[in-house]
Image: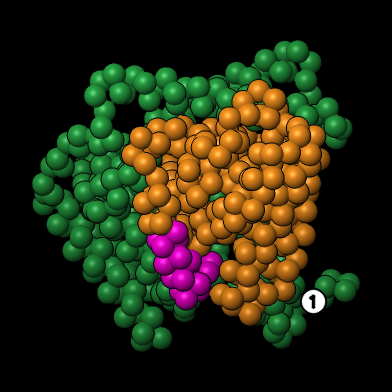
């Protein structure tokens, strides 16, 4: 849902998105240690595998975005993780776009990175039940933020898209609920089974 | 319109079976630069003639690469999944001269025009990417990216992702099958979300443990954070020809846009 293909956005929008993505990637790759690459990459592969898994909902199916969960677990390494996944998706399946790689990365990773940063200390400290609630809120907010950013990317590209973009936000509501619930239960599982994954010195930090 | 198409057609389409190797023979770097250049240009086009020329160019590439149109069609349908919402909404929501009404819904000429133009550009870009990039092994693509100056850390991450994605997809499929064997089915109830959350969590735990094993194995072999990258073969005549062809097509598209 959040992958805007080539040929939809206007040049200023995808150029600004591209520049922002280059800045974010440079910053987060610099912060990453060479030794952490396999760990971040294998985690990204599992997030990617999960997002490819389709969950049937009524007559259609949805795919998880996982921005909130990735932000909580990967921290700033969410930028290269999402960029690499989108690149692979564009190159392997022709799905998504090349000119829109930057803006798509920003739309998914920025909410994840910021909300992950904000929620992570509280999630790490909280009890299992409270952590699950916090993670639910975090990932639901991430989905909403991504939906808004996608709508804004469309609206800034052409006034003709503005009304459609507003209507498209509604399609994010079911995803928000489902992703929130699944992330909440996933975090409660991880707090019980592998609490160190959420400790201050985990994955991408 | 025929300008762009003619520039693209003869050298690639000539030769039937023999031409199947035309795209195959290209260097990864040529393909990456070519795909980015073409897709970027298509994204900048504004007028119909140039957009249609771009679509013709993309279709020419498909036939030159010897790809089956049926397989490509199936892929396109999948890609259009995202677009359906936008395409259905556009004719009703864009402001313009009304051309038809369905009850409270008004179809505007501008909306329809927008929707058609979107279908053309999106398909032209997707076809270009499908022909130039999806036909190459991701590992070669990784090496080409490194040769074009992508940061080595990112290239490593990309190559690891390529290596472990199929493995983790298999792992996920196995876990889902095991759940189904125990009688799990998707319903709108709490148990379903709890189980799916546990499934996601379990996959993450397993991938972390896998990453630890991989890391240990790599350190045993003296990994210091850098992979030795094989040098790339120098580019050949095929690459030069393709580069010239691409430049020609780009110039034609831009001229077409400029003239109309």
Chain A: give its colour: orange
- Please report, as a chain letter, where disc 1 is located: B
Residue A20 on the magenta span:
yes
Q: Is residue A119 left or right of residue B57?
A: right
Residue ID for mark 1: B106
Q: Is residue B186 left or right of residue B32?
A: right
Q: Position of residue B223 (x, y in %)?
A: 26, 28
Asked if residue A56 can be seen in this view, the reply is: no
Q: Position of residue B122 (x, y in %)?
A: 50, 61
Residue at the (29%, 74%) spot, across then down: B252
Q: Quadrant of the N terminus of chain B?
A: bottom left
Residue at the (58%, 69%) spot, across then down: A153
Q: Quadrant of the C terminus of chain B?
A: bottom left
Asked if residue A137 can be seen in this view, the reply is: yes
Q: Which residues are magenta?
A: A1-24
Give above or below for A132 relative to A155. above
Give above or below for B78 relative to B230. below
């Amino acid at each position: 849902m959040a992958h805007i293909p080539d040929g939809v956005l206007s040049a200023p929008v995808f150029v600004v998105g591209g520049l922002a993505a280059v800045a974010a990637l440079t910053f987060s790759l610099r912060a990453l240690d060479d030794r952490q690459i396999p760990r971040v990459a294998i985690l990204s592969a599992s997030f990617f595998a999960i997002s490819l898994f389709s969950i049937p909902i009524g007559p259609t199916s949805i795919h998880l975005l996982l921005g909130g969960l990735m932000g909580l677990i990967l921290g700033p390494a969410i930028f290269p993780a999402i960029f690499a996944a989108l690149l692979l998706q564009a190159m392997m399946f022709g799905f998504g776009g090349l000119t829109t790689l930057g803006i798509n990365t920003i739309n998914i990773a920025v909410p994840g990175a910021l909300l992950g940063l904000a929620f992570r200390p509280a999630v790490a400290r909280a009890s299992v039940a409270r952590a699950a609630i916090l993670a639910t809120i975090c990932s639901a907010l991430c989905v909403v933020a991504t939906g808004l950013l996608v709508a804004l990317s469309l609206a800034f590209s052409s006034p003709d898209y503005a009304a459609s973009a507003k209507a498209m936000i509604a399609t994010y509501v079911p995803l928000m609920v489902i992703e929130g619930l699944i992330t909440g239960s996933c975090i409660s599982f991880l707090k019980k089974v592998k609490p160190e994954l959420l400790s201050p010195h985990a994955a991408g930090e | 319109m025929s300008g762009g198409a003619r520039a693209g057609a003869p050298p690639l389409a000539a030769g039937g079976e023999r031409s199947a190797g035309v795209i195959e023979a290209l260097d990864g770097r040529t393909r990456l630069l070519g795909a980015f250049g073409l897709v970027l240009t298509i994204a900048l086009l504004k007028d119909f003639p140039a957009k249609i020329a771009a679509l013709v160019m993309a279709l020419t590439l498909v036939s030159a690469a010897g790809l089956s149109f049926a397989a490509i069609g199936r892929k396109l349908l999948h890609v259009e999944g995202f677009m359906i919402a936008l395409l259905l909404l556009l004719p009703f929501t864009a402001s313009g001269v009304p051309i038809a009404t369905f009850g409270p819904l008004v179809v505007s000429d501008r909306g329809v025009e927008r929707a058609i133009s979107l279908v053309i550009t999106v398909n032209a870009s997707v076809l270009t990417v499908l022909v130039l990039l999806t036909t190459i092994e991701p590992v070669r693509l990784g090496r080409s990216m490194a040769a074009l100056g992508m940061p080595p850390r990112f290239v490593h991450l990309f190559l690891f992702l390529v290596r472990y994605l199929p493995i983790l997809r298999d792992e996920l499929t196995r876990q889902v099958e095991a759940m189904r064997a125990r009688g799990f089915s998707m319903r709108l109830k709490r148990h379903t979300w709890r189980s799916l959350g546990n499934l996601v969590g379990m996959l993450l735990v397993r991938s972390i443990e896998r990453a630890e094993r991989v890391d240990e194995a790599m350190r045993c072999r003296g990994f210091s954070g850098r992979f030795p990258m094989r040098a790339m073969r120098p580019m050949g005549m095929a690459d030069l020809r393709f580069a010239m062809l691409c430049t020609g097509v780009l110039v034609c598209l831009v001229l077409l846009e400029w003239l109309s």
